[in-house]
Image (spheres, helix red, strand yellow):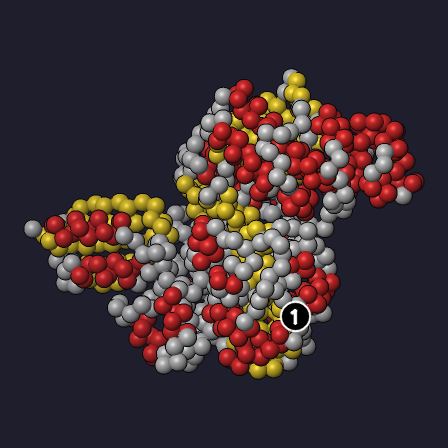
Amino acid sequence: MCKRATIAITGTVQGVGFRPFVYKKATEMDLRGYVLNTGDGVKIDAEGDESRLEEFIHQVCNEAPTNAVIDSCDVTYEEPQGYRMFEICESAQGECDLKAIIPPDYAICPDCLHELQNKRDSRYHYPFINCVNCGPRYSIVKKIPYDRPNTSMDVFEMCPSCEKEYKNPKDRRYHAQPISCPECGPKLTLHRSNGSLLTEGYKAIETVAKLIAKGHIVAIKGVGGFHLVCDASKNRSVLKLREKKNRPQKPFAVMFRSVYDMMKCSDLLPEEEELIRSPERPIVLITKRKPHRLEKFCISCDGIAPGVNRIGVFLPYSPIHVMLMEQVKCPIIATSANISDEPIITDSAVLLEKLGDVVDYYLDYDREIVNPCDDSVAMIQDGSVQFVRKSRGFSPECIKLPVSLDKKVLAVGGHLKNTIAIGFGNNAAISPHIGDLSGIDTMEYFERTVKMFEGVYGFNPDVIVCDKHPGYESTKWAKAQGIPLLQVQHHYAHILSLMAEHQITGPILGVAWDGTGYGDDGTLWGGEFFKADLNGYERIVHFESFKLLGGEKAVKEPKRVALSILFDLYGEAALDLDIPLLKQFEKEEIFTLYEMHQKSLNAPLSSSVGRLFDAVAAIFDVVYTTTYEGETGLKMETLYDDCPLMSHYPFEIHNGVIYYKEIFKEMLKEPCKERALSKFINTLCHIIVAIAKEQKLPVGLSGGVFQNKILTTQLLELLNNYEIPYYIHQKVPPNDGGISLGQIIYAATHDS
Ligand code: ZN
Ligand code: FE
């Protein structure tokens, strides 16, 4: 009997080879009808033999292509139409539904890699090879539906042979929107730092390899922006890049030709290897092998990640990288081309303007990067992926919420590591990493991303959600929009983001530990225990507050926090202590700081665990002034010794306050610095366990402090030992990159 069904599929189903997959299945099963991209996914209309139709529906909904993610699959049965064949139709124009999702950029797939390296293939050594399973997506999209005229490939007219492939449903480039070949596609060019052309095409890649080997710094246009590249095995090149980029300490990411080469530097876990090889190709933070001497590909370890025992590694992901790595034969530093925390540079004119004196040469091409996308950074924590920065390969991303929104919501995120998100129904779409909103360029990028998201999703928010911090640029921007506003306490937003991604509604014991966030009482929170659910929270325990001498200045200078705590412990007698910390100040300065402490002048109160880490690092001669965010935690991890987990300092919790003075006094008695730091970390773990036992609730860990791998690993071991259930971040970063998601879900249960 002939039956007809229409199937509406939503999720990441555009730009991932879904329509050809449907076409193949339908023609194999002798069904007739059509498939097309719609604003909210893919629509299939198919008719034919009843049992084959059922099998077709089952396969389409359950055997999607590699990069597709199906969110929903709605089937309705209708009167047969008498279709004669099965077709792939042009995309439906017009009204875009809010649920549409732009696919992220994927690394070159094995099939394209094979063609790239095959001398007989027409795309041999072609730097822009791609297919339905791989290549640029979000980075080139201007609007949806995701079709070529709506991307920056619109200016390249397909040649007849590409067009043939594009139109052939049996071809693996059928409807591959960025399809091109050496005849008709973008061109690669190599320039000197004055802009003049040096060479083009494959020759440009060979030349770049030689320039890198000679010790030059070359900018290379990748997928989401430019990288600054140099030879990772040459200490001199690495130090030159540090000096020129004014980046004295912050670790650089290293691109390796193969996983085999990485294994010379680290004992990779199988999960790490899988993540490194994934089509998203993030930078993966792995632990350096000890001792740091590496035989053949001796990378400059001290130059790459000074004082840190982890390095960020990744594999080539664009065809340009692949060909370059074949030529270079050594690992290369590949760091985002930008000035400190500004957005990644995507355009050669801007590159020359901002980094003209840093780069010696630059490799460019003439396809516009519409949406900048930094490399994603991730690590394996507790056997699963945890993000530090979520961008290329993963973003934009749609997350299902545990509750439904009755309005359209725009969330503007935090201040550092900003992301934005939009929410509708039970979906939240999160932007790629935007960055530190202090800079004008980042703020511009922020506004462009908001526009981009609103445009792409055809979205006008009914409400905007922002942080309570009056000084955040995102808060100021939100207040200026003239749209109903909701403000969420920062640490509650952290905990909400965790509940959202795990699709739970609480109550949980939310532990929010980070650098700082604006507290309800006007002090700077960051060591909080909340009893929280989607409706609200109660701050049940927090760290005793201490003074940040000089406010913002103390955030950059851990030595000030350390001194403040020593004044708390010993008063003026702190100045008689025999520790190197005190030599970090001028005599005058130290007395001024003492005055500030005594009179509480420009000394805001904080309960932040991130700042306590800073204090410990400065007291024990690890870091006095930070040069990048998270530096103290990373360096303390490296010093963690084989101290048994049960060994910790005594701590005191009274009426919801954790008193830190005793812990510091005990620490100062410790003869060995490694032991003191290790027992400090253990103590933090035991504090969480003690409170969790009392509260008898599952524990939820959020906030940048939990990016500390040692702290989190030790803590989870303890929680497992005591059989306390816990949640950690797997979809959004524990840091402020997750704040926008937390803000979205806040709007589900709160009215403006
Ligand atoms: Zn062509
Ligand atoms: Fe935070």
Q: Position of residue 193 (x, y in %)?
A: 67, 75
Q: Is residue 79 left or right of residue 610?
A: left
Q: Position of residue 692 (x, y in %)?
A: 54, 24
Query: Please, what secondary structure does the residue beneath circle 1 have?
Result: loop
Q: Is residue 529 above or below residue 307?
A: above
Where on the picture, by quarter, is residue 428?
top left
Q: Position of residue 694 (x, y in %)?
A: 54, 19
Residue sitting at 74 percent across and 44 percent down? 622
Crowdedness near tag 1: few (<14), some (14–19) or many (≥20) residues, C-alpha within 10 Å: many
Going by the picture, which residue comes out furthest to the top?
A: 655
> Toward the viewer: 461 or 159?
159
> Toward the viewer: 643 or 479?
643
Look at label 1 and name its amino acid: Ile
Residue 600 visible within the image: no
- For the C terminus, the quadrant is top right
> Toward the viewer: 30 or 326?
326
Residue sitting at 73 percent across and 39 percent down? 673
> Toward the viewer: 670 or 468?
670
State the residue position of label 1: 217
Q: Is residue 628 above or below residue 465?
A: below
Where on the picture, by quarter, is residue 16?
bottom left
